[in-house]
């Protein structure tokens, strides 16, 4: 069955690495009709709008998008594009798998999936300065909002993900010992949801600081982690670092009405246009997209081809110790399919 998906090539290295990914998907026999749309600087240049209505309309229709990295224009009136997309489609679950594949790193057996709540917590954007004794910036306050609804759906998502992907354990990561109300509500709700999965998926709890330490000492002990927005933001970069950096890590943003798949890294302006960027993160984001729509056998085949190519270290890009171009690496992955 033909899959309809929106393709946002993005800025900087984006077009090169998304092209490579589209080529890989086609070589794997995925029947996808891409609706190519602009966002970021490319859209500003053409339409003077970083998120044109046509792009939003396309995602609304296809409910599925693969996105290259975007440069958010600096200046008044422009929102953060990624945050705006998250809000527009209520993409509440940010799913970032991190798996050891590249040889020679400090850790060999990392295979952790971090599920981050994407819409609440300290990132709701309610902040203000407090004026004291003539100093307009004497203090600043930020509000964190955690809801039972938001906590329930993200923890449920983590458990359902675990079931669907044969994962054994979900770790609820929190700071309820200090933030007794907001984090307390997240933990309390998480425990209630976890009970529904008893006997099918194990559950444990960790305070975020202890979790950070254990992640850098014994990362292989973790399976699925579910946590609130700010902690998820930080810990997901940590888990990316454990397996070789942002160039290898994909991220999915999932909601009820749409899902957007992307690389975690940015536009890499220092290497843009040179044809040497590593397309792995976007390729793995496409694998997540195929898994999301149930094309799991093809997803596994593509993932295997990527992992074998990376493990062999014969034809890999500069950031992971090789000298191949984006195109040569893509050809090597396609040859492994
Ligand atoms: P970056 O991720 O673009 O680059 C950091 C370093 O990693 C650079 O040295 C870069 O060359 C390297 N790198 C990144 N991806 C790579 C790849 N696929 N292959 C090889 N090397 C790679 O981060 P930055 O420099 O902080 O940000 C640059 C721009 O990207 C900014 O405009 C920022 O706003 C934007 N950004 C966008 C997203 C997104 O759209 N999801 C995420 C982060 C940053």
Image: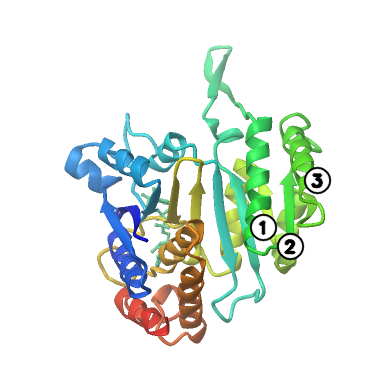
Name the image colouring: rainbow
Secondary structure beneath dot 3 equals helix
Residue at the far top: name it. 133
Q: Position of residue 95 (x, y in %)?
A: 56, 53
Secondary structure beneath dot 2 equals loop
In three-dimensional space, the C-alpha distance between marks 2 and 1, rounded to whole angstroms, equals: 7 Å
Residue at numbered disc 1: 162
Q: Position of residue 121 (x, y in %)?
A: 61, 34
Label 1 CA crowd tier, 10 Å (few <14, some 14–19, many 20+): many
- What residue do we see at 54% from left, 25% from top? 127
Left-right relation of 310 to 168: left
Mark 2 in CB contact with mark 1 (< 8 angstroms): yes
Q: Earlier in the sequence, mark 2 or mark 1?
A: 1
Residue at numbered disc 3: 195
- What residue do we see at 53% from left, 12% from top? 134
Which quadrant holds the C terminus? bottom left
Depth check, front residue: 147 or 199: 199
Residue 259 seen by the camera:
yes
In three-dimensional space, the C-alpha distance between marks 3 and 1, rounded to whole angstroms, equals: 14 Å
Q: Compared to 237, does 117 lie above or below?
A: above
Residue at the far left: name it. 46
Q: Compared to 192, does 144 lie above or below?
A: above
Q: Compared to 239, does 82 lie above or below?
A: above
Mark 3 in CB contact with mark 1 (< 8 angstroms): no
Q: Earlier in the sequence, mark 3 or mark 2?
A: 2
Residue 12 seen by the camera:
no
Left-right relation of 66 to 216: left
Residue at numbered disc 2: 168
Q: Compared to 192, does 137 lie above or below?
A: above
In three-dimensional space, the C-alpha distance between marks 3 and 2, rounded to whole angstroms, equals: 15 Å
Mark 3 in CB contact with mark 2 (< 8 angstroms): no
């Amino acid at each position: 069955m033909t899959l309809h998906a929106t393709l946002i090539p993005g800025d900087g290295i984006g077009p090169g690495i998304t092209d490579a990914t589209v080529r890989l998907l086609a070589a794997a026999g995925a029947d996808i009709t891409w609706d190519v749309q602009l966002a970021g600087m490319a859209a500003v240049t053409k339409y003077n709008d970083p998120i044109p209505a046509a792009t939003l309309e396309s995602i609304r229709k296809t409910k599925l998008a693969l996105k290259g990295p975007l440069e958010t224009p600096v200046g008044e009136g422009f929102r953060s594009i990624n945050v705006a997309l998250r809000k527009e489609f209520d993409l509440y679950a940010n799913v970032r798998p991190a798996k050891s594949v590249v040889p020679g790193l400090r850790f060999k057996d990392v295979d952790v999936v971090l599920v981050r709540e994407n819409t609440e917590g300290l990132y709701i954007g309610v902040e203000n300065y407090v004026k004291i004794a003539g100093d307009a910036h004497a203090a600043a306050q930020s509000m964190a909002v955690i809801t039972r609804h938001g906590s329930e759906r993200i923890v449920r998502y983590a458990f359902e993900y675990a079931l669907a992907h044969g994962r054994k354990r979900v770790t609820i990561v929190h700071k309820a010992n200090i933030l007794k109300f907001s984090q307390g509500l997240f933990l309390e709700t998480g425990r209630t949801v976890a009970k529904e999965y008893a006997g099918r998926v194990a559950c444990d709890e960790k305070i975020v600081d202890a979790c950070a330490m254990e992640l850098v000492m014994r990362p292989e002990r973790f399976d699925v982690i579910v946590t609130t927005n700010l902690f998820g933001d930080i810990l997901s970069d940590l888990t990316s670092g454990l397996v070789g950096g942002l160039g290898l890590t994909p991220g999915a943003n999932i909601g009820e009405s749409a899902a957007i798949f992307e690389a975690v890294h940015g536009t890499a302006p220092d290497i843009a246009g040179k044809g040497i960027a590593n397309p792995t993160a976007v390729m793995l984001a496409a694998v997540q997209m195929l898994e999301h729509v149930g094309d799991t056998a093809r997803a596994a085949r593509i993932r295997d081809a990527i992992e074998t190519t990376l493990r062999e270290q014969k034809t890999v890009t500069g950031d992971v110790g090789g000298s191949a171009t984006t195109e040569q690496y893509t050809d090597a992955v396609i040859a492994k399919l």
